[in-house]
Amino acid sequence: QVQLVESGGGLVQPGGSLRLSCAASGSIGSIVAMGWYRQAPGKQRELVARITSGGTTNYVDSVKGRFTISRNSAKNTVYLQMNSLKPEDTAVYCCHVRYYMNGDDYAYWGRGTQVTVSA
């Protein structure tokens, strides 16, 4: 069984910063990629940022230059540093992991952490 423990969400003023963390544990095999998705009320879920096991990153255009994704492979942990936050960044942010185990491809979602950007 896989567990994803997310932390770091909260309420912040526009222009502020938050750092999200997601630690994966359990029978997780070989991680292919970890990332963060978000879903705002009334909107579709979107990929915010993703990092592969090889260190390749990609970001949704709206966060480029403001958000940075990083990882600690030894701890199976991914971080999302969010700077210059805007009200439109308000959403539930969910951690996602893709991994291989015993020749099969798996994906797992965290429960999500709320990020609210408001004055």
Image (spheres, rainbow, N blue to C red):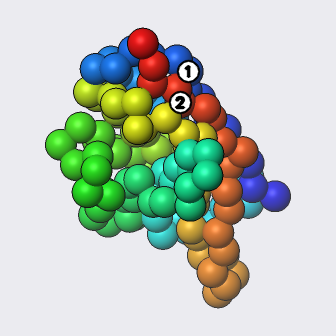
Q: What residue type is labelled 2?
A: Val
Label 1 to label 2, Cα distance in Å? 5 Å
Q: Nearer the viewer, residue 18 or 90?
A: 90
Q: Name the residue under label 1.
A: 10
Helix, strand or loop under label 1: strand
Q: Which of 40 and 1 is in front in this view?
A: 40
Q: Is residue 42 left or right of residue 3?
A: left
Measuring from the top left, give residue 7's x and y in whole percent.
Answer: 59, 29
How crowded is the residue under tag 2: few (<14 C-alpha within 10 Å), some, or many (20+)? many
Residue at image position (67%, 56%) is 109
Measuring from the top left, give residue 84's x and y in whole percent.
Answer: 26, 27
Q: Is residue 40 left or right of residue 26?
A: left
Pointer 1 and pointer 2: residues touching (CB < 8 Å)? yes
Q: In this view, does 72 lie to the left or right of 15?
A: right
User: Mark 1 or mark 2: which comes first in sequence?
Assistant: 1
Mark seen at residue 23: none
Mark seen at residue 115: 2
Measuring from the top left, give residue 108's x and y in whole percent.
Answer: 68, 62
The residue lying furthest to the left in this view is 65
The residue lying furthest to the right in this view is 1
Q: What residue type is labelled 1?
A: Gly
Q: Which of 45 and 54 is in front in this view?
A: 45
Helix, strand or loop under label 2: strand
- Compared with 32, 86 (above or below) is above
Residue at image position (34%, 44%) is 70
